[in-house]
Amino acid sequence: MEEHIASLVLLGVISWTTAFLFIRKMFPKRSFDFCNRLVSTIHATVAVTLASFSVENWKCPVCPQASTSSPQQMKALAVSLSYLIYDLVCCLFDKKFNIDNCVHHLVSIVGIGAGLAYQKCGSEMVAALWITELSSPFLHLRELLKELGYRDNDLNLAADISFAAIFTVARMVGGPYLTYVTLSANNPFIIKAMALGLQLVSAFWFYKIARMVKYKVIKRTGPKQVDATQSRD
């Protein structure tokens, strides 16, 4: 990994930590998770923006394959790597320890770190960054709304469905294609392994999200259907 990229990662870790402490001070009555999710939402927005700017050819976003990463791609990946390191540490301090999230972060850190070390696979990794972070703002919005008191209402359900829809299209349509492209190209073995691992984690999350949406829809429509049936009787 080049020295200026390593410095950017270190600066990023410090910056994300500072942002969290600042938000924590601004909202002292809010939970640790609430403040961290605000930082995560900022990162998702920045990550998607940087990834979009670093795409070399929108007619083929994953081209050229297995090529040397451009400076813009390296910077975009370094910013997200710094966030993942920061957020992994936050996961260890949060009261709600989530093993799924930790595994996802570890896989992503190893994968992005390998990409930065080899300075290859920039197109594929930036595409993966774009795909994985596209649904993140809606993921965090769901939990932010709950803490703000908007639980089990239309706004929260809309956030749930929006997150599920974007996640499904991005990770279960775009994700498998990107995994196939990454595995087919002449990429280092560790990057191929991390691409496959990330897709497996996404598939597991998709299963959990599908169950969550099914539960919420049944919960919202069930009582109404029962009342309607009773009224007809």
Image (cartoon, rainbow, N blue to C red):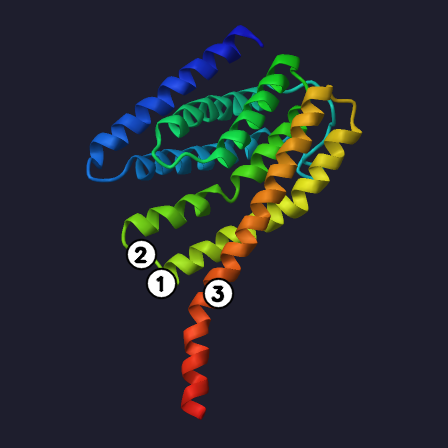
Residue 181: which quarter of the image? top right
Location of residue 125 by image quarter: top right
Residue displayed at 45% across by 73% down = 222
Q: Nearer the viewer, residue 42 or 145?
A: 145
Against 211, residue 194 (above or below) is above
The residues tagged by marks 2 and 1 sit, at their Cα atoms, a distance apart of: 6 Å
For disc 3, the marked residue is 217
Q: What residue type is labelled 1?
A: Asn
**Tag 2 residue:** 150
* Quadrant in which residue 157 is drawn: bottom left
Give the SS element for disc 3: helix
> Mark 1 highlights which residue?
153
Q: Which mark is residue 9?
A: none
Spot occupied by residue 134 in the image (x, y as percentages of width and height)? 53, 42
Mark 1 vs mark 3: in front: 3
The answer to whether the residues at label 2 and label 1 have Cβ atoms under 8 Å apart is yes
Mark 1 lies on a secondary structure that is: loop
**Position of residue 198 measured from the top left corner of the image (x, y, whole percent):** 62, 34
At 58% from the left and 48% from the top, the residue drawn is 206
